[in-house]
Image (tube, grey):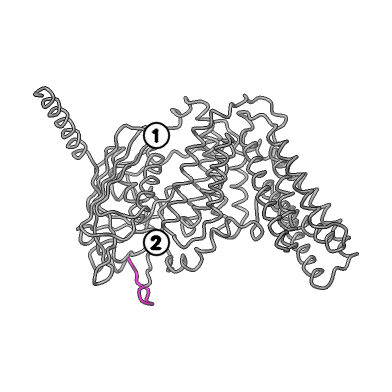
Amino acid sequence: MKTWRENMKKILTLLLITFLLNSAFAVIIKAPAVSLTDRGYVGVPINIQINVTKGDGHVFMDTMPLTELDMQGSARIAAKVAGEVTGKDMSKYNVYITVRSDVPVVGGPSAGGTMTIGIICELMNWSLNKHVMMTGTINPDGSIGPVGGILEKIEAAKKANCTIMLIPKGQRYVEVEGNKVDAVEFGKKLGIKVIEVGSIYEAIPYFTNKKIIMKEYPENPLIEEKYKDIMKELSENVLKTANEKYENLSKELSNSYVGYEYQKALLNELTTSKSLLEKANDEYLKNKYYSATCSAFNALIKLETIEHTLKYLTGEEDVKTFLTEVQNKISHDKEIVYSKNVTTNNFEEILAGRIRIAEAEKLLDNAWKSYYLGNYDEAIKYGSFAKLRGDSAIWWVSLKENDNNGKIINEAKLKSLAQQYLDNAETILTYVETLFPNLPTDDLENDLESAKEAYKDGDYLLTIAESIDTCVKAEIPLVIFGDIEYSKKYARNKINLAENLGITPISALGYYEYANSLNDTISKIMYYKYSSYYAQMDIDVIKELNKSISENISSEINIVTNENVNIEETTTKENNVGIMISAIIGGLIGFAGGYLARRVSA
């Protein structure tokens, strides 16, 4: 009995020493929060303690009082971003986060940026400036997202004896009871300097007097040229098909009459397709081959719809027969796509083909639903798009048919990577759903379910592609009011890193080029997101197949310290992010998930 007691004492002593050591070396950082009291909402500081130990990639959180799930989602994303910023492989660490507050607080995602700073300081063994506080969500690309309660949080900074308050870029002006309040001036009255930051990189110097600069990779001109050669041939073929179809349909439509309303609608669609073709031809002449392909592809969707609507109206073809033919064609296309060997040289193109087949099947499902509801016009639109989406799958898997230098990949080796992408998609979607509970996310839930089904079927490339699709669409509300230039630069550097590893990131380069050609903010951000995700996917697949590469691209950061740090402060024009979010947030996911109302990539 005595021996047992002595052993227990030793164990308890070791546990106590471990706890004390962890506490001694932990990072303690304050964050502003909002609490609901009898007097309304008030700002309160909360304490966050962060420990990082060797481990296996887990993030643990202990909160008192209990916080909402969004804070836990923030913590996982914060750890992921901290790993990328510091060049650390977070699968080799565990993160422990303890949150303490004297009063219940409302929500928790606004501490995401703060937690990221804390984890970075733990990983780098850096001390913190206790007089700096920050509010802002953390986005997967390291940008800082908008939050509510800005003025209350500035008051919380005052209570915590802070002199600098960092807020998300674009949130300087806050509306209170119909009046605009300048957060910078509000802070001055409290003796606090309020500064806007757009990314975690901009925030780090204020807390640490150190600046992390990610290594910027140069473009690889040989790979850029190879990409252009591949895309030039594809764009020529698609443009030729689209131009010929336009000429034929112009003649056919001029020789037909299907009633005033239909004739007018079809002529309008023909005019739109002509504009898209003119844009495509112009982009081709400017060597923007993927953008030209996408514009021509969008024209083809309209032309295909015109053709089969005309056949239906003239009695040449019934809708059910058309959809059955499309269904048979997609089945044949799928056989071709899945018959291709996956190699180290073509895995991206095979992935692109598989996700396009999956999309074609979803479009066809929508077509049949419309048909059985008696909405034949909509059925033809979805059916036409489905047919062409199947065509585009064949285009993609044929891009490198003559490149036989790659080694065949055993797809089972990608199982672990597919699980990581699936977990990441689920984390981001859950995060968005807790941030925006009124946001319609049925389409995204369906995308996530498709990714899970692909994983169960052992189709790991499709799992990765479906997961990326979910992530990109889910992230739009997080970054829509962020810095587009940041998203653009982030994507470009991911592409350059892939190129420097000898990869030809065709999808990433294509999406990047396409984003540059678009005008509306949502589309640009969405395709920059696709670009960065696909470039990272290329890197991850190569790393998974060749573990030694991981060592070459980890810790690729430059650190500037002390007097060498040059902090550039930026400010935004007067606006109101909160009001803008309320006005359009409901339509963002619908835009990202909708098929017929947006321009799409080929």
Q: Looking at the image, can residue 285 be seen?
A: no
* Residue at which label 2 appears: 571
Relative side of 309 to 458, left or right: right
Q: What is the CA distance from the residue labelled 2 to the residue labelled 1?
A: 37 Å
By secondary structure, the bulk of the magenta-drawn segment is best described as strand
Task: Name the image quarter holding residue 150.
Answer: bottom left
Q: Residues within 10 Å of mark 2 (few under 14, many from 20)?
A: some
* Residue depicted at x 50% and y 30%: 543
Against 7, is 587 above or below?
A: below
Q: Amino acid at mark 2?
A: Thr
Is residue 88 in view? Answer: yes
Amino acid residing under circle 1: Ser
Q: Residue extending furthest front?
A: 1
Between residues 465 and 497, which one lies in front from this camera angle? 465
Marks 2 and 1 in Cβ contact (< 8 Å):
no
Q: Residue at x 58, y 47 (%)?
A: 512
Mark 2 or 1, which is nearer the eye?
1
* Magenta highlight on residue 182: yes
Q: In this view, which residue lies farthest toward the top?
A: 3
Q: Magenta stretch containing residue 396, yes or no?
A: no
Upstream in sequence: badge 2 or badge 1: 1
Left or right placement of residue 370 versus residue 261 in this view: left
Expressed as whole percent of the image width and height from the top left, the position of residue 19 reads 19, 37
Could you tell me which secondary element the residue under label 2 belongs to?
loop
Residue at numbered disc 1: 91
Q: Residues within 10 Å of mark 1 (few under 14, many from 20)?
A: few
Above or below, comparing residue 74 to residue 315 in the picture: above
**Front residue of 105 and 325:** 325
Tag 1, which secondary structure?
helix
Residue numbers of the magenta segment: 176-183
